[in-house]
Amino acid sequence: MKCAVHHVPRGARSPAWNMSLRILLIEDDAMIGSGLRQALERAAMTVDWVKTAADAASALALGEHALVLLDLGLPDGDGFHLLREHRARRGALPIIIISARDNLDARIKGLDLGADDYVLKPFETAELLARIRAVMRRHAGSASSTLTVGDLTLDIASHEAQFQESQALLAAREFALLSTLCSRPGMIFSRAQLEAAIYGWGEEVESNAIDVLIYAIRQKLGRSAIRNVRGAGWMVTKDAA
Ligand code: CA
């Protein structure tokens, strides 16, 4: 099967992308960064990792991510500056500071500059994941950790899905795809939109990757869990199929 590298389109901004599980990780420490990336990917998130303030500024300007994890001490700048600039431009991305700076002033400054949370290093990955879910819930305006669309219910913490009589544990990408569809019930997602929502920069995406994921989800939950719209894409709906 032919492979194509997924390129992030510049400029054009689909509303769906901000509902995806793509995380922008801004962290210069190689060990912390790679450990964090693995943990986030295991939790069904796609991670775009930048290691400098300059790359972070470019990535933030694209506005493609669902959430940002922001280290403060970067080789070419300070995370506070990035945060201040983003909010000054009315950027509304959820941002969680991850830092070893444990003094009260830094924590207050971070929150006052518009961070959604401040997590001290070293942290337990499980706690960071819970904080990410909490921030995402707040941004989605929901207090619940489940997402329900019609007969379909997704548990954001456990990645369990229920559809009518079927219940199943979804793999990371399956969960990412289905939660992207559920973020906009009734909206048709094209193949390109789904790829953009669930794959990071430079990831190689098999040309049939989305079909494979949809097939796997339907095997677990039933064919009518996801609707095909011929020639256009896929969607989930609030009404029974
Ligand atoms: Ca650092």
Image (cartoon, helix red, strand yellow):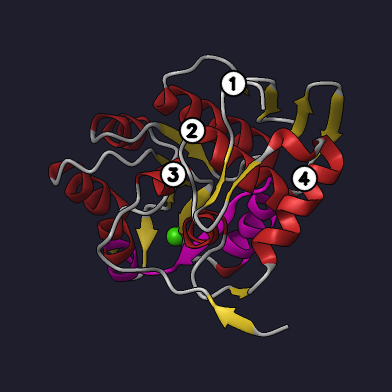
Q: Position of residue 105 (x, y in %)?
A: 30, 33
Q: Is residue 39 magenta?
A: yes
Is mark 1 in CB contact (under 8 Å) with mark 3? Answer: no
Question: N-terminal of the two: label 1 or label 3?
Answer: 3
Judged from this view, the residue extending furthest toward the bottom is 2
Q: Amino acid at mark 1?
A: Asp
Q: Count neighbours of disc 2 (C-alpha within 10 A) and say few if under 14, some if 14 to 19, many if 20 or more.
A: some
Mark 4 vs mark 3: in front: 4
Disc 4 to disc 3, C-alpha distance: 25 Å
- Location of residue 31 (image quadrant): bottom right
To which residue does mark 2 refer? 186
Alpha carbon distance from label 4 to label 2: 18 Å
The amino acid at mark 4 is Ile
State which region is magenta. Answer: 31-57
**Which residue is most to the top?**
143
SS of the residue at dot 2?
A: loop
* Quadrant hosting ligand 1: bottom left
Amino acid under disc 2: Gly
Report which residue position mark 1 lands on. 239
Residue that carries the numbered disc 4 in the rendered image = 217
